[in-house]
Image (cartoon, rainbow, N blue to C red):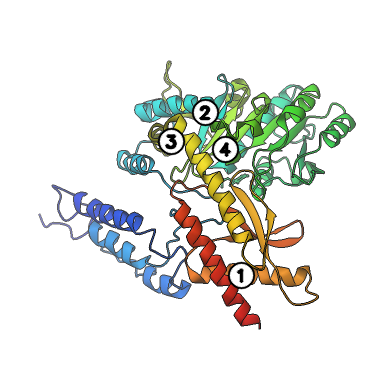
């Protein structure tokens, strides 16, 4: 029989993976080992990338190793150096070696980690790593958890549990009756909340009109008086109080020790967004910021940010496992359940899912408790020297000196009579110059009505040398930007 010319069966049926994985390994090592010297910013234009990648989709396909080496060549200049040490925009984090390797294995093993029987080791690793996480993050040992794609879906998972529990107390079964005719749930929070919380509320049908934004102090903290007043005013209406452990600009923490008892007295559900900030709990030096946080009802955080696990990895924790599983669990006769092991489908919003526990398990084992604390503290120290270093440059101003790993600076227009609109323009101009230089990557934002450059450090690779190189890159950008305007 004539051999098929299609590439389903591979060129070499006896050894179908070796060549393509070999190309991938070789390239991955080259990429990771070259990060310190490569530009942090993309160097290829959109047109270039598109013209390379938009190949004809053929009828016959191609040899696997060919596909992989083409891919490596075609994306050249279109891969951000965000996993290297000089990327300070957004809160992204890098990848730990053990965690990356475990992530590769996760793809090779290709388990469907939906239920225990479809991936026994995958399920068990989540069960174990979930326990470790609660311990490291200082959360109640009895809390349930889910490994989800990121903090966004952790919010959805936690707030689905909140919706279930709050309505059940009022005799309303949201799973059966839906939200039509249900008592509206109020959401109280400060103006510093992250947009992913709003999206979770939209997805869950709770609606943005139910969000009541309460005043925050100059430190970005929700005011206890405002919370108490609003809870009193709401009478017995079901209420979620959204608190923040680490906002994107200042790394601000709500005062949990004061706020949570107030919310509890009013029988509100307290949810904490701790996407990266919850990790301060791992450090004896920064743990104080989270005092009282264990009294909340649910917590959302990420693995792919400060823990330096590859994407996608977030964690949802719920103090009341019954509320959690009531919101998520699903039974089908064809899904065989295990009596003694944890079935992820009882806790997760997904059906089929990636066995994402392996990379977390590996990261936690590589670092150990002290390593996690050191990672957190080291990032905070670098953020601090980076912000102060930039602040010392002529024409720079520190807007927020980091308490943890987030800071803000801006750049001033030196012309006589220059005002905020001029400083805003100057700030954006300097950021653009830094990015064009390719040495470091920062993001811009509008903070308290003014343009600012955000400085965020959450990568294990960032070193003191990276900090020096980044400050020098900003110094050069300031000179260049000055040249253009005068
Ligand atoms: C990043 C972030 C989120 C969203 O997390 P994802 O992992 O991107 O879904 C939510 N809240 C805060 C404070 C964040 O920094």
Rendered position, 121 above or below 15: above
- Kindly state the secondary structure of the residue where label 3 is placed: helix
Report the front residue among 424 and 65.
424
Give the quarter of the image for residue 88.
bottom right
What distance separates the C-alpha of mark 4 from that of mark 2?
13 Å
56 above or below 403? below
Q: Which mark is residue 430?
A: 1
The reply to whether dot 1 and dot 2 touch (C-beta < 8 Å) is no
The answer to whether residue 136 is seen in the rendering is yes
Marks 2 and 3, the one that precedes in the sequence: 2
Mark 2, residue position: 136
Residue at 75 percent of width and 36 percent of height: 180
Tally of numbered discs: 4
Front-most of residues 377 and 213:
377
Q: Earlier in the sequence, mark 4 or mark 3?
A: 4
Q: Position of residue 106 (x, y in %)?
A: 35, 39
**Mark 3 neighbour class, 10 Å CA radius: few under 14, some 14 to 19, many 20 or more:** many
Which mark lies nearer to you, 1 or 2? 1
Q: How far apart, in angstroms, are the residues tagged by discs 1 and 3?
A: 37 Å
Q: Marks 4 and 1, Cα distance to the nearest angstrom?
A: 32 Å
Where disc 1 sits, the SS reads: helix
Identify the residue at the far top of this view: 340
The picture quadrant for ligand 1 comes to: top right
């Amino acid at each position: 029989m004539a051999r098929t010319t299609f590439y389903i069966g591979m060129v070499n049926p006896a050894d179908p993976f070796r060549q393509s994985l070999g190309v991938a390994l070789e390239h991955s090592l080259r990429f990771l080992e070259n990060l310190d010297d490569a530009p942090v910013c993309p160097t290829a234009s959109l047109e270039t990338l598109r013209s390379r990648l938009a190949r004809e989709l053929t009828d016959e396909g191609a040899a696997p190793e060919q596909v992989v080496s083409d891919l490596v060549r075609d994306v050249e200049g279109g891969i951000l150096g965000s996993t290297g040490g000089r990327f300070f925009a957004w809160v992204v984090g890098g990848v730990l070696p053990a965690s990356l390797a475990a992530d590769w294995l996760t793809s090779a093993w290709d388990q469907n980690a939906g239920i225990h029987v479809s991936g026994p080791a995958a399920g068990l690793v989540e069960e174990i790593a979930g326990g470790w996480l609660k311990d490291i993050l200082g959360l109640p040992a009895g809390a349930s958890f889910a490994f989800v794609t990121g903090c966004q879906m952790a919010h959805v998972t936690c707030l689905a549990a909140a919706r279930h529990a709050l309505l059940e107390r009022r005799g309303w079964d949201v799973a059966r009756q839906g939200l039509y005719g249900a008592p509206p749930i109020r959401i109280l929070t400060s103006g510093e909340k992250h947009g992913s919380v709003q999206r979770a509320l939209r997805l869950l049908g709770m609606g943005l009109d139910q969000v009541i934004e309460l005043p925050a102090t100059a430190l970005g903290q929700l005011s206890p008086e405002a919370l108490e007043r609003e809870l009193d005013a709401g009478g017995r209406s079901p209420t979620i109080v959204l608190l923040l452990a680490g906002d994107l600009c200042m790394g601000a923490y709500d005062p949990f020790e004061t706020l949570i008892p107030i919310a509890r007295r009013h029988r509100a559900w307290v949810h904490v967004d701790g996407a990266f900030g919850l990790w301060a709990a791992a450090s004896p030096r920064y743990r104080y910021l989270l005092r009282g946080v264990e009294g909340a009802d649910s917590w959302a955080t990420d693995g792919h940010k400060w823990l330096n696990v590859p994407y996608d990895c977030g964690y949802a924790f719920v103090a009341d496992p019954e509320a959690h599983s009531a919101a998520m669990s699903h039974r089908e006769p064809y899904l065989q359940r295990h009596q003694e092991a944890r079935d992820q489908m009882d806790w997760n919003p997904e059906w089929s899912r990636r066995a994402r526990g392996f990379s977390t398990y590996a990261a936690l084992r590589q670092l150990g408790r002290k390593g996690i604390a050191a990672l957190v503290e080291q990032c905070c120290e670098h953020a601090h020297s980076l912000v102060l270093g930039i602040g010392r440059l002529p024409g720079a101003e520190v807007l927020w000196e980091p308490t943890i790993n987030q800071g803000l600076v801006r750049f001033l227009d030196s012309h006589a009579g220059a005002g905020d609109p001029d400083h805003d323009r100057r700030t954006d101009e300097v950021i653009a110059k830094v990015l064009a230089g390719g040495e470091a990557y920062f993001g811009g934002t509008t903070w308290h009505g003014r343009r600012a450059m955000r400085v965020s450090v959450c990568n294990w690779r960032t070193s003191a040398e990276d900090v020096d190189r980044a400050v020098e890159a900003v110094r050069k950008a300031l000179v260049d930007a000055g040249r253009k305007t005068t």
